[in-house]
Amino acid sequence: NAGVTQTPKFQVLKTGQSMTLQCAQDMNHEYMSWYRQDPGMGLRLIHYSVGAGITDQGEVPNGYNVSRSTTEDFPLRLLSAAPSQTSVYFCASSPRGGRSTDTQYFGPGTRLTVL
Amino acid sequence: EDKVVQSPLSLVVHEGDTVTLNCSYEVTNFRSLLWYKQEKKAPTFLFMLTSSGIEKKSGRLSSILDKKELFSILNITATQTGDSAVYLCAVCKVYNQGGKLIFGQGTELSVKP
């Protein structure tokens, strides 16, 4: 299994540009999440999904959209990039059911810089 | 407001030392507390704790949870340079149909030879 994969690894955008961060997992996990990590602030939840066709907002959803058309993929879209969105983005997944839901598996991350 | 606070924020020790990392929390609808290790890349899972007083161990690492006082500690004995990393504490709370992780700021551990 490849686990959780993310593309691209690095990205530089100009203010106002849009882009999509890709996330895929091959573990048949129902739950998928997007986090951003900023210095001194830990990881903060942006959006999450409990299954195909179901998404919900996390702590910091503004400026981001998600969709979940398949179990495997959970892309994160930046609608109009702003310098405040400069961060490292992690995608995570976990299986459904019991305590195993709590243990999330993280992708390698995407480092995004917005100029 | 839910919060998870870790201390210290950074720590420098020498190989062979024992370290204790702290995590306190105020989170409604608590499900579990998790520790992750992050070495310049994705966080990797270390422990999940759900009950008070039961110590989880993995080699030189151990962790315990106190649900009455709302804190957890992560101990690392006989530290090695490979233990250098950011250690993240997260609390999973019941949220909609599943769980939601709330992370602390992390403790950056540096182990010198």
Image (cartoon, rainbow, N blue to C red):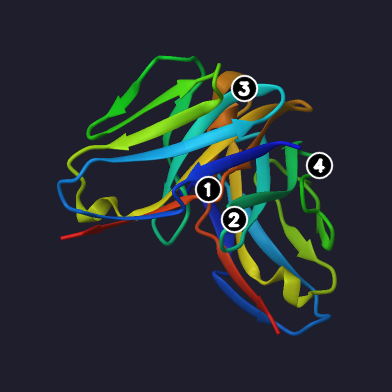
Q: Position of residue B57 (x, y in %)?
A: 30, 26
Q: Position of residue A106 (x, y in %)?
A: 53, 48
Disc 4 from disc 3: Cα separation: 21 Å
Viewer-proximal residue among A83 and A89? A83
Chain hosting mark 1: A
Q: Give the tally of numbered discs.
A: 4
Are callouts 1 and 2 both on one chain?
Answer: yes
What residue is pinned by disc 1?
Answer: A106
Other-residue count near label 3 (Cα within 10 Å), few / some / many at <14 / 14–19 / ≥20: some
Disc 4 from disc 1: Cα separation: 18 Å
Chain hosting mark 4: A
Disc 1 from disc 2: Cα separation: 7 Å
What residue is pinned by disc 3?
Answer: B31
Disc 3 from disc 2: Cα separation: 22 Å
What residue is pinned by disc 2?
Answer: A90
Are callouts 1 and 3 both on one chain?
Answer: no
Other-residue count near label 2 (Cα within 10 Å), few / some / many at <14 / 14–19 / ≥20: many
Disc 1 from disc 3: Cα separation: 20 Å
Asked if residue B21 is positioned above or below residue B105 in the image, the reply reads above
Three-letter amino acid code of the residue under disc 1: Phe
What residue is pinned by disc 4?
Answer: A55
> Tags 1 and 2 in contact by the CB under 8 Å rule?
yes
Q: Nearer the viewer, mark 4 or mark 2?
A: 2
Q: Secondary structure at mark 3?
A: strand
Three-letter amino acid code of the residue under disc 3: Arg
Q: Nearer the viewer, mark 3 or mark 2?
A: 3
> Tags 4 and 2 in contact by the CB under 8 Å rule?
no
Left or right position of A2 against A87: left
Q: Which residue is drawn at the image coordinates 49% and 15% (left, top)?
A: B51
